Amino acid sequence: MTQRLLNKTRYKLALECPNKLFYTNKEAYANKKSEDSFLESLADGGFQVEELARLEFPDGVLVEGDPGDYDALVAETKKLLKQENVVIFEAAFKFKNLFVRTDILVKKGDKIQLIEVKAKSYNSQDEDMFLTKQGKILGSWKSYLFDVAFQNYVVKNAFLNWTIVPYLMMADKSKTAKIDGLNQLFRISQKADNRTGINCKVNSIADIKQTVLGRINIYDIVKGIFTGEHKYSRDFSFEEGIKAFAETYEKDDYFNEMVSYTACKNCEFKANKIEEDAGLKSGYKECWENQMQWTAEDFDKPTIFELWNFRKGNKLFEEARFFLEDLEKQDLNVKPEWGKISTSERQWVQLEKAVSKDDSIYLLKEELKEEMEKWTFPLNFIDFETSTAALPFTKGRRPYEAVAFQFSHHVVQENGEVTHETEYLNLAQGAFPNYDFVRALKTALTKNEGSIFMFSNHENTILNAIYVQLEYSQEEDKCDLQEFIKTITKYAGKSSEKWNGRRQMLDMLDVVKKYYYNPLTKGSNSIKAVLPAVMKSSKFLQEKYTQKLGDLKLSSKNYKADHVWFQLDKEEFQDPYKTLPALFADWTNEEIENTISGLEKLSDGGAALTAYGKLQYTDMKKAEQKELSNALLKYCELDTLAMVMIYEHFVELVD
């Protein structure tokens, strides 16, 4: 039987909520994080940072073996530690019911450097980057610093005579790459001959002239965590917490931590109705049943967790007011704003409709109509897919600079005709696509003078970032590209110039928030929530998009004529994102077994980001590359078509 030891992953989970230790890694319980493609994409970026970090220690030795055979890994580590001086990658340490593997451990006699490598960025020119002005650890750094403190604690107890200095090693945004193609030197391959499955195409830091990583000594902060100067959030001490978490996990007990607003709102162990019908349990429900004696009727009531952009949840929790029906208007401090739905008004509308089970749309019809009359045809709807690579693509670039690799562009004429007008996708390995991306976008959007729409401010932010990149580039047409960017954007605070483009992109998300509330979104304004709500509410869209694509006044670059956007299942319209075709659907089992991407479907931005990363850093066959490329094109096309559908719904409402 595998030993139940508290490792650093479980320790960080327990810091969020100790009850999660009981539910983690149990197939009987729903777990949203196990399906979270954003986490997967972040993890995939980490392998490059880790491999680059190891290059700084050419004599380092990797501890290999079965990840579940703790004793064997510890024994191998101890053999290496008999040397006076040694560098070990993934050294294994066990103390009582605790177990850690350290990214890089540098031993010089009894002096130890414990180096934790993170796929995160910092700027070495910033002072006190981890602490507030009051000397408290910033929330964004807490989990990282307590992670290292936990490792330090285990190693120190395993070897009491050692003097340990902990470090964080991360991408330093003050540094630039000195060669082209840095990000292509560390690749995932089926033929890789090491445990991590990585082929490193460089032998030393000298080969790349300079690393873009840096090390930060965090000894004082870790010491402060040990002494209680820095606490995570609970009353018990750092050491008491470790012992309590470890004992609970070892015995597979339920910790019985009191429910809280922050932990419960974001709990990954919630099961939706489909998951429950499939037999999965909900850890979230079990906590509330155990501690608050909630019944099935209570779980059906709308709670304060659902309230959009709500910042008084902790206060209401302390008052044991969990349900929306418990709130009054003064709790939201409702303040109307002329000509729009204010934030507090939107919250109150959501509350009233949820409590009364009213699914009707709340609309400022005249205000929306007035807004739409300002728009100029033909209307242009655009969506970008972007990445922030840990290691730069080209010489002179910094870590985590924005990379724009794809866009989709739909056009709507005044007569209602819809055209998937343009698309762009650059998957060339090691290419820095941003300037070609803007050239293609310029060609697409200068064919007409119509209004341009995005959903949220992402596209404006990315184009501002590219504007700054162009400033330092040698592109012959950089001035023309910058002028184009200024035409369709507004200044976002990174450039020395300020502007408001004469044709700046309009934010459909802003339009939704100002004039429209659909209770079926349950307060979310994400396009992934708005589209399904719109399609269930709109007779026009239902009549139109239940037809085959070939029968519509609508063109597509990636879908066949027999494709149907609104599909019925048990008399329910299915979310178009959920009906996107599976990858490798026409492949044989043998062909699928030989794939390396590990992806099955692209239905969200995280999956698209993951697919791009896989295509950049994985040595896959051309057929698999083509399959992922086609899936990216289909996904991005749906993003701009979703915007068109929302627009068509607005037309239906104001006519």
Image: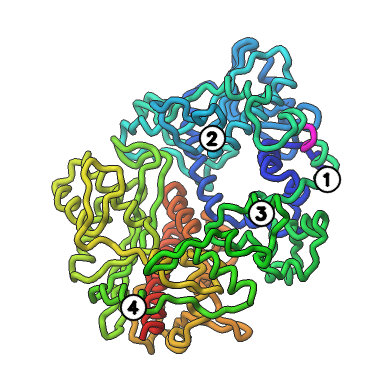
Q: CA distance from mark 4 to mark 1?
A: 59 Å
Query: What amino acid is at disc 1?
Result: Asp
Amino acid type, label 2: Leu
In the image, 501: left or right of 155? left
- Judged from the image, the secondary structure of the residue bearing numbered disc 4 is helix
Say if the magenta span includes residue 243: yes
For label 2, the SS is loop
Give how far apart the Cα atoms at labels 3 and 2 are: 24 Å
Residue located 70% across and 56% down the image: 269
Callout 2: 10 Å neighbours few (<14), some, many (20+)? few
Instruction: Find numbered disc 3 in the image and state the secondary structure of the residue it sits on.
Output: helix
Q: Which residue is mark 3?
A: 316
Which of the two discs, 2 and 4, labels the residue nearer the N terminus?
2
Would you say residue 40 sits in the magenta stretch?
no
Cα gap from disc 4 to disc 3, whole angstroms: 38 Å
Spatial separation of the CA atoms under disc 2 and disc 1: 32 Å
Query: In terms of image quadrants, where is residue 590?
Result: bottom right
Contact, CB < 8 Å: mark 4 with mark 1? Answer: no
First reached walking from the N terminus: tag 3 or tag 2: 2
Kind of residue at disc 4? Lys
Magenta region: which residues? Answer: 242-246
Which mark is drawn over residue 369?
4
Q: Looking at the image, is mark 2 or mark 4 nearer the viewer? A: 4
For image coordinates 36% across by 47% down, the residue present is 402
